[in-house]
Every structure is written in C-alpha cells, then in structure tokens.
Image (cartoon, helix red, strand yellow):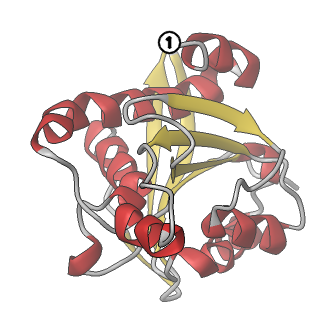
Amino acid sequence: MASDFWLIAGLGNPGGKYEGTRHNMGFMTADALAERWSVNLSDHKGLALLGKGMMNLDGRNQKFFLAKPLTYMNESGNAVASICSYYQIEPDHVIVIHDDMDLDFGRIKVKAGGSAGGHNGIKSIDRSLGTPKYSRVRMGVGHAKRGANAHDNTVNWVLGGFGPDQRKQLPDFLADGADAAEEIIFHGLAKTQEKFNGR
C-alpha cells in the first residue's frame, strides 16, 4: 500500500566545511521548507536528517517528509531509498532538490526523469530507486571556468561559497526553490514547469 506522504529530499554534504557552498543548495532549500512548515529534523538510521510536516495550500493539506541525506552527495540514493522503503513512498511522490551548474545562478528548472546531467547525487538516487522517474528541482549555481583544469575548477566551484551579490539574492532564490517543490505536490509537474522553466 503506497503511502500518501510525499518525500522532499534536499541534497548536500554534511559537515561545517560544506555549509553555505553551492553544492549544498538542496540542504539550504530544505532548511527554508523546514522553517516555513515548522518541521523538526532528526536522525533516520544515521543516513539522513528527517522530519515530518503538513503543508496547507489552496485549502488543501498534504503530509510530507523532508530529508537531508547525511551520506555525502555520491551516496544520496542510500538515504532516499531507505526512507522510501521504510515509509512506502513511491518514486512519483519523491522530489529531489539539487544544485545544477548548467543553469545560471537564480534560475530554477523542474523535471522528472531524464539524465542525471553528471550530478553524482542524482546518479546515486537513480541507481538506488531503480528509476529516474521522480521529480527534481534544479537550482542554478552557474558554471566554473572551463580550460586546462576544468575538473578541479568544477570541484572548487561547487564546493565554493557565494559572492556578496549572490548572497543577497540567496534568500529569495531558496524561497523560489521551496515554492517549486510545493507547486509540484499541489499542482503537478507540468504546471510547475510552465511557471518556473521559462523564467
């Protein structure tokens, strides 16, 4: 019997040195949702911080879980799959929020299925759930410099922090990411894509 809960998982890396970095956009957006809906996160099997909440939008209530995997990005799927199997949540009720270098900072794209786009967290979830058919909120962080040290540049970029201008915009951007996750739950993927993907 599939659960009527949704699972929203914000991806990131645990630990102080990763706090506030581009790769932790998912964690930061999850924090914005936790604050918005008064969700308290606590340990789930050492794999994730997990909390349960209730959203109320357009006169409807929806129960949801909010997760921040503690497995490091490359093993995010272990945490997501464990929560899904424990609470019987189907992939079509899963929303993953993650950073995306193919989008400029401040842009959001929403999709379900398709390629992992080189994102190790998404690859891991695809593997662990056995399907790419779950919703994703892609939070743009812009791209590192190409060139001779492209790989190192990329690693340093996603694990780097935001400049002063971006930091000013960050609260609004995270709020938009939180809105996108709610929209998927209440209005479906197609409507949410119309609203966010063209911006």
Residue at 75% from the left image edge and 18% from the top image edge: 190
Work out whether residue 3 or residue 71 is closer to the camera in this orientation and state it.
Answer: 71
Q: Residues within 10 Å of mark 1 (few under 14, many from 20)?
A: few
Work out whether residue 85 or residue 28 is closer to the camera in this orientation and state it.
Answer: 28
Q: Relative to 84, is 35 on the left or the right? A: left
Q: Amino acid at mark 1?
A: Gly
Q: Relative to 9, is 125 on the left or the right? A: right
Taking the view exactly as shown, the residue that stands out farthest to the front is 148
Q: Which residue is denoted by mark 1 in the rendering?
A: 59
Give percent across and percent down for residue 5.
Answer: 65, 47
Give percent across and percent down for residue 125.
Answer: 72, 67
Residue at 30% from the left image edge and 43% from the top image edge: 32
Work out whether residue 119 or residue 134 is closer to the camera in this orientation and state it.
Answer: 119
Specify the quadrant that holds the N terminus: bottom right
Give percent across and percent down for residue 44.
Answer: 50, 79
Q: Is residue 183 above or below residue 25?
A: above
Quarter assignment of residue 4: top right
Taking the view exactly as shown, the residue that stands out farthest to the bottom is 46
Q: How many marks?
A: 1
Quarter assignment of residue 124: bottom right
Q: Relative to 67, is 41 on the left or the right? A: left
Q: Secondary structure at mark 1?
A: loop
Residue at 54% from the left image edge and 34% from the top image edge: 181
Residue at 44% from the left image edge and 26% from the top image edge: 179
